[in-house]
Image (tube, rainbow, N blue to C red):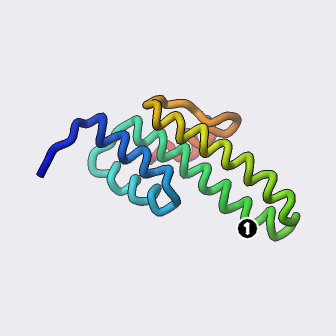
């Protein structure tokens, strides 16, 4: 079996965390065996973004209508894009406004 450098492996797992909620769960499992601070950082960021996304779809769409939910959805997509660009660049860049909260709320991951 071919061994990959640690940097390639950590980048792959961090990128995987941004690919749907299933990718986030897989990244959490893979990161539990050998903790990496870079991967943990991006898992926390994307887990928060995923929770915001599902809350937006469930709560805002149900109670306030599609226009509000769509507008907030665009903002959530922008947060996801900023986080994804950060992982592609190999940086631990917090997403604006809520990134510090995600790091506090999910610090056990």
Q: Residue at x 67, y 43 (%)?
A: 78
Left or right: residue 1 compared with residue 108: left
Question: How many marks do you count on the picture?
Answer: 1
Q: Residue at x 66, y 62 (%)?
A: 54
Q: Compared to 32, does 85 lie above or below?
A: above
Q: Residue furthest bottom?
A: 62
Residue 15 drawn at (x, y percent)? 43, 46
Q: Residue at x 67, y 57 (%)?
A: 53
Q: Compared to 44, does 96 lie above or below?
A: above
For label 1, the residue is 58
**Callout 1 environment at 10 Å: few (<14), some (14 to 19), or many (20+)?**
few
Residue 17 drawn at (x, y percent)? 46, 51
Left or right: residue 67 compared with residue 104: right
Toward which corner of the image does residue 99 lie, by quadrant?
Answer: top right
Residue 25 drawn at (x, y percent)? 44, 59
Left or right: residue 17 compared with residue 100: left
Q: Residue at x 70, y 35 (%)?
A: 97
Front-most of 28 and 12?
A: 12
Q: Residue furthest left?
A: 1
Front-most of 41 and 79?
A: 79
Dot 1 falls on a residue whose secondary structure is helix
Front-most of 63 and 15?
A: 15
């Amino acid at each position: 079996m071919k061994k990959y450098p640690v940097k390639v492996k950590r980048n792959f797992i961090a990128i995987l965390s941004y690919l749907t909620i299933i990718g986030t769960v897989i990244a959490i499992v893979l990161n539990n065996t050998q903790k990496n601070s870079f991967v943990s950082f991006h898992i926390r960021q994307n887990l928060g973004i995923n929770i915001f996304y599902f809350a937006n779809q469930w709560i805002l769409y149900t109670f306030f209508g599609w226009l509000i939910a769509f507008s907030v959805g665009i903002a959530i997509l922008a947060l996801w894009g900023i986080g994804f660009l950060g992982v592609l660049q190999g940086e631990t860049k917090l997403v604006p406004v809520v990134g510090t909260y995600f790091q506090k709320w999910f610090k056990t991951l």
